[in-house]
Image (cartoon, helix red, strand yellow):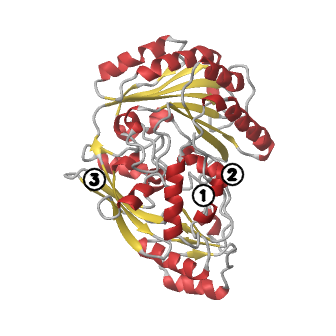
Amino acid sequence: MHNQPSFQDVSELRFAVNGPVFLPTDPGFAAETAAFNLATVHAPDLAFGALDADDVAAAVRWAAARNIPVAVQSTGHGATNMVESGLLISTRRMLELSIDPLERTARVGAGVKWKALADAAAVHGLMGLSGSTSDVGIIGYTLGGGLPVLGRRYGFASDHVVSFDLVTADGTLRVVDAAGEPELFALLRGGKGNLGIVTAIEFRLFPDDALYGGGIHYPGESAAQVLEAFAAWAPGLPEDASASLAFVRLPDMELVPGPLRGKFLVHLRFAHQGDPVLAARLLEPMRACAPVMMDSTGPLPYSAFDAIHQDPDSPVPVRECGFLLSGIDAGAREAILARLGAGVESPVLIAELRLLGGALRGVPGSDCVGGRDAAYSFFMAGIAVPPTMAPLQEALHGVRAALEPWSTGRTFVNLHGHSADAADRSRAWDPESYRRLAEAKAALDPQNLFRFGPVVEPLRAAADTAPAPV
């Protein structure tokens, strides 16, 4: 249970901070709490737009003194579960961004998106380890590990963090790095928002050497042969190359180009950093495996990486589901095609197999990033509006159940999707990581202020909710 803020409480918060405070009846409340995922409508008791780290610290101290739970949001791309009651802190105004081209590092505030960093870094011939879209916030992405477009070459984005600026549940702002607080530094890399609010991070950048990337679209009728070819081709790729395969059912909506509306397509996504001649040669088996509708692969500036996955760039209402696979043998492929292949009616808008391995394997146990031992990430999403919500939920659960024999039992915390309960959320971490997070949370957040989103249970309940060893 928690306290409801009184009129006096709200007045004291407004006095303590510089950013705007909104009640549900205030103009601007809906805009302040809006998520990129329009299916998630937050309903906090009040919202606060932080201007800087001092604002965040003051708001957390205010909440802790009144036992009012705290949620945090920047872009809202990860808003798969709604925030009910408490204080929602929006960090989207925190736009600090600086680059040290000599040290090849960047420092960004909690509101900075990958687009801003990509453009700024490109001026110096550098790049950050961004994911499939430039519209997502850097900090939320990195706290969940961050699966880069070139992850097989460089590893997870969180592998390259230098330091975090963290506001803990007592309202203290601390700088956390490997030398000063090695365990906390490890837990923040993949631990998401369990241990406080990260107001800024510093991370390493890399030379933005030649990128060869883009996509190949095939007609949906070729799904079986393309999937079979992908399963034979992808594991043999060098670590300089990353690839994914998506089954895409484009909606009959104006936002989709006319010739593609209502179509079922298969979309190969590819990125390679190195010799473009070699990259083109690597793609030859996939170009030959089935008729090609469109091939947009070729040399690409890294700052244009959105062209690879072509994720939506405007808010949409979706429900998501993700999990990790140990492989895609003939049985797994048959299960995928039976639920999502040609001739199947499904409300699943997109289902993606993303190749893992390479540098993503990293060093298990050095942080809280899950999935280092998985072969593929499997992710699905569909439009979540009332007419399709129930069929979509049924379809998502059906695909997950059908692929259970090939599941590792884990998920990526950023690609987990809607969480049903604590046991479901716990799948984002192995048992040892979960225990470490629960112990740290008990020490740093004894009131369980940070209880929204993909969080571990308080230590007293950890034994009942931690995942079983596999």
How many neighbours does mark 3 have within 10 angstroms: few (below 14), some (14-19), or many (20 or more)? many
Query: Can you tell which quarter of the image residue 460 is in?
Result: bottom right
Tell me the SS state at disc 3. strand
Q: Amino acid at mark 3?
A: Thr
Query: Does residue 188 lie above or below 354 as drawn?
Result: below
How many neighbours does mark 2 have within 10 angstroms: few (below 14), some (14-19), or many (20 or more)? many
Q: Which residue is mark 2?
A: 39
Percent position of residue 420, x then y: 70, 51
Query: Does residue 46 lie above or below 406 as drawn?
Result: below
Disc 1 and disc 3 in contact, CB within 8 angstroms: no
Q: Which residue is mark 1?
A: 453
Q: Which residue is mark 3?
A: 105
Tell me the SS state at disc 1. loop
* First reached walking from the N terminus: tag 2 or tag 1: 2
Q: For the residues marked 1 and 3, what is the alpha-carbon distance in whole angstroms?
A: 29 Å
Q: For the residues marked 2 and 1, what is the alpha-carbon distance in whole angstroms?
A: 15 Å
Percent position of residue 445, x then y: 53, 70
Q: Amino acid at mark 2?
A: Ala
Percent position of residue 268, x then y: 51, 25
| Left or right, 84 with reference to 428 | right
Residue sitting at 24 percent across and 50 percent down? Answer: 104
Residue sitting at 56 percent across and 47 percent down? Answer: 428
Report the mark closest to the observer, 3 or 2: 3
Report the mark closest to the observer, 2 or 1: 1
* First reached walking from the N terminus: tag 3 or tag 2: 2
- Residue 95 in sight in this render: no
Residue sitting at 62 percent across and 57 percent down? Answer: 463
Disc 3 and disc 2 in contact, CB within 8 angstroms: no
Quadrant of the frame with the C terminus = top right
Query: Can you tell which quarter of the image residue 42 is in?
Result: bottom right
Tell me the SS state at disc 2. loop
Query: Does residue 155 lie above or below 233 as drawn?
Result: below
